[in-house]
Image: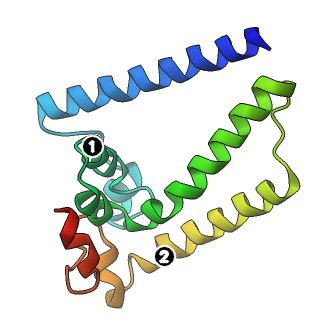
Amino acid sequence: MRTRARRLLSRLGLLAAAGLTYALLSSWLGFGLPCPIHLATGLWCPGCGVSRMCLALLELDPAAAWSWNPGLMLLLPLLAVLGVRAAVRYVRTGQTRPARWEQVLMVLMAVFLVVYGVARNLPGFVWLAPGQTPPELFPFLRAFS
């Protein structure tokens, strides 16, 4: 059990170091990695704005994070629960396979992201594009900015 916990912590540490390195480099250089789907097609994919969303979260600015990718911001609590459950299950038992209900939840989240990716490119949903959330639709977010 200790070996699995150490292995998990070392991998999470590497992931955190990579993320912080990317955040520092993008802050210093003033730009991040562009989305290849957006570059090739001009369409917003479900992940467009994720880098800027994460940078806004690092700066403790949830309103800005929401404006960059509201779809993923909705899923973050569920992703956190699934991640913690997976980590605990791995450390305790060594199993990496999620429970059936977790698999169903992941499929539903994937379907949501596909629908969200299509919707953010439709004319009536321009406010879903990165950086475009109008404050009148979400007045509760003004309290955080």
Q: Do the residues labelled 2 and 1 touch (CB within 8 Å)?
A: no
Residue 104, position as x, y percentages in the image: 79, 62
Numbered marks: total: 2
Report helix, strand or loop for mark 1.
helix
Q: Is residue 45 above or below residue 19?
A: below
Residue 1's disc number: none
Hey, what amino acid is under mark 1? Leu
Residue farthest toward the front in the current orientation of the protein = 143
**Identity of the residue drawn at 21% across and 86% down:** 136
Q: Which of 89 and 116 is in front in this view?
A: 89
Instruction: Name the residue located 79 percent from the left edge and 55 percent from the top edge.
Output: 103
Residue at the disc numbered 1:
55
Residue 3 drawn at (x, y percent): 74, 8
Residue 97: x and y in percent read 84, 39
Residue that appears at 22% across and 63% down: 144
Which quarter of the image is occupied by the C terminus?
A: bottom left
Q: What is the distance, in whole Å, between disc 2 and disc 1 at their CAs?
A: 24 Å
**As rendered, which of 102 and 39 lies closer to the eye?**
102
Quadrant where the N terminus lies? Answer: top right
Asked whether, in this view, residue 105 is left or right of residue 131, the answer is: right
Q: Where does label 2 land, which residue?
A: 118
Q: Is residue 65 left or right of residue 100?
A: left
Indicate the quadrant where residue 122 lies: bottom left
Amino acid type of disc 2?
Val
Of the numbered discs 2 and 1, the one sitting upstream in the chain is 1
Which image quadrant is residue 33 in? top left
Q: Relative to 41, does residue 12 appear above or below in the rendering?
A: above
Q: Nearer the viewer, residue 1 or 107?
A: 1
x and y percentages locating residue 44 in the rendered image: 37, 65
Secondary element at tag 2 = helix
Q: Residues within 10 Å of mark 1 (few under 14, many from 20)?
A: many
The crowding category of the residue bearing disc 2, from other C-alpha atoms within 10 Å (few below 14, some 14 to 19, many at least 20), is: some
